[in-house]
Amino acid sequence: MINSFDYSTYLSPFTARYGSTEMRTIWSEVYKRKLWRKIWVGLANAEYKEGLLTKEELNDIVSHKEDIDLVRAKEIEKAIYHELMAEIRTFSEQCKIGGGKIHLGATSTDILDNTTIIQIHESLKITKSRLKNLLSGFSGKIKENKDTICMGYTHLQPAEPTTLSYRFAFYAQDLLLDYEFLEKIEPFLLGKGVKGAVGTSASYTSLLSEEKSVTLESDILRDLGIKSVDISTQTYPRKIDLLVVEALSNIASSLHKFAFDYRIMQQPSIGEWVEKRDKNRIGSSAMPFKRNPDKAEKVCSLSRYVSSLFNSAWSNPALSLLERTLDDSASQRIFLPEAFLAIDECLITTQKLLENLQINMSAVEKNLSIYGQFSAVEPILMYISKKGADRQEMHEILKNACMKVWEEKDRGKNISLLSILQKDTSVTRYIDSKKLKSLLDPKNHIGLAKIRSDKFLKKLSTRLKS
């Protein structure tokens, strides 16, 4: 059974295409079983201290903790239809002396749930590291582009000028919130501990005293490097998985926005961002000229997939009946590893997108010269109104001038708002040409963009050092 996996059968895209080897290893079948055995060894060691195992039995169990035999385990599982019991029997067959004491007092989720929490913590460590590296990359972009003034867009229409630094700071601010949320939830990511079939530790108290069963759990958790919930049923609260998927969905949302904006800014009609591309990269099988933003599109696609997993993560705690039903198990073994692997791929790809992002300054300046002039209309209106002009009358004049610029642009001609207003005596009687030119310079209309970018950059730099 285990040897039948090859390219002639279905393989998940997460088998090799998406996510890193280190993330895949954490969620691999071999590593999962090594963690199971680590917990069984911890249990055996704690029970040995209480006189429930002999030294020979303990040594026998410890000596075979790395001897994973998936072929044998799958053979047994096919017959008994119980994954964990199949591994127990495989382990027990290897331990001729101590095999009969493996899993003493435990229920399946004492092993499974603590394993999952260890996998979650190890996966989050990789995720946090990648997120921190990405934030460092954005920090560099904020610094590099502090003086780059560009057109801002609302409703995908030219709005007012901003700075590229300010735009990058916005993306980084989202990601910093995601990073801080990860740190906030980590103390809540607790294992089940060893509490038995319905969480009461009845099996352990029947082997030991109440006090010693508490000590037994503490010893095992200390060896595993995790903490447990105060109250469990047969499982740890599935609300913990919901917290994890929520945190990963938050990251997915932030990455999706950046990747989507990346796609918009690359398209030729704006063309301000350009992804540096490998010369061998192919954009289209049919159209050799294409420079499709496929990497950014992949980030958007996988981010949307992560967000779709939220419903399953929500359903498991909500629909777990009384002390436990098994309808959480199948979905959990899919959505947890896939959420981590999808985010892993998104973070890796976004890091590359950011590193390969080039600014097309000619497009930036062109768009700013065409659309940035409109940002001066309100300041001009305020200025000439203070000089005695009729506000309503001037509003109409300025509107008509702007519409003239738009009409000419639609005909393929570029005329400036300045050239129109300089010829309008109803305007120039209140404002001279020099002042008019100054107000129409988009570089004078970025407000506090530079100040706020610098302030955020200091905050981000401090956070990255902590």
Image (cartoon, grey):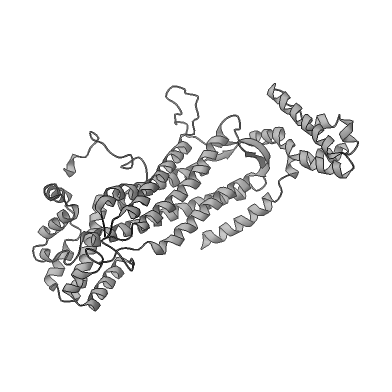
Residue 21 in view = no
* x then y, percent, for residue 357: 54, 40
Residue appearing at x 17%, y 64% in the figure: 103
Q: Which of 12 and 246 is in front in this view?
A: 246
Above or below — where is 414 with respect to 298?
A: above
The quadrant of the rendering that contains the N terminus is: top left
* x then y, percent, for residue 187: 41, 64
Residue appearing at x 35%, y 48% in the figure: 312
* x then y, percent, for residue 431: 88, 39
Q: Report which quarter residue 280 is drawn in.
A: top left
Q: Report which quarter residue 47 is drawn in.
A: bottom left
Say left or right for 313 vs 404: left
Above or below — where is 204 with respect to 378?
A: below
Q: Nearer the viewer, residue 398 or 88?
A: 398
* x then y, percent, for residue 151: 66, 39
Q: Report which quarter residue 102 is drawn in.
A: bottom left
Say left or right for 153 vs 261: right
Say left or right for 336 vs 128: left
Say left or right for 314 vs 438: left
Residue 282 in view = yes
Above or below — where is 262 with respect to 113?
A: above
Above or below — where is 187 with respect to 320?
A: below
What count of labels does the image hold? Answer: 0
The single residue placed furthest to the front in the displayed view is 322
Q: Nearer the viewer, residue 48 or 391?
A: 391
Residue appearing at x 47%, y 57% in the figure: 181
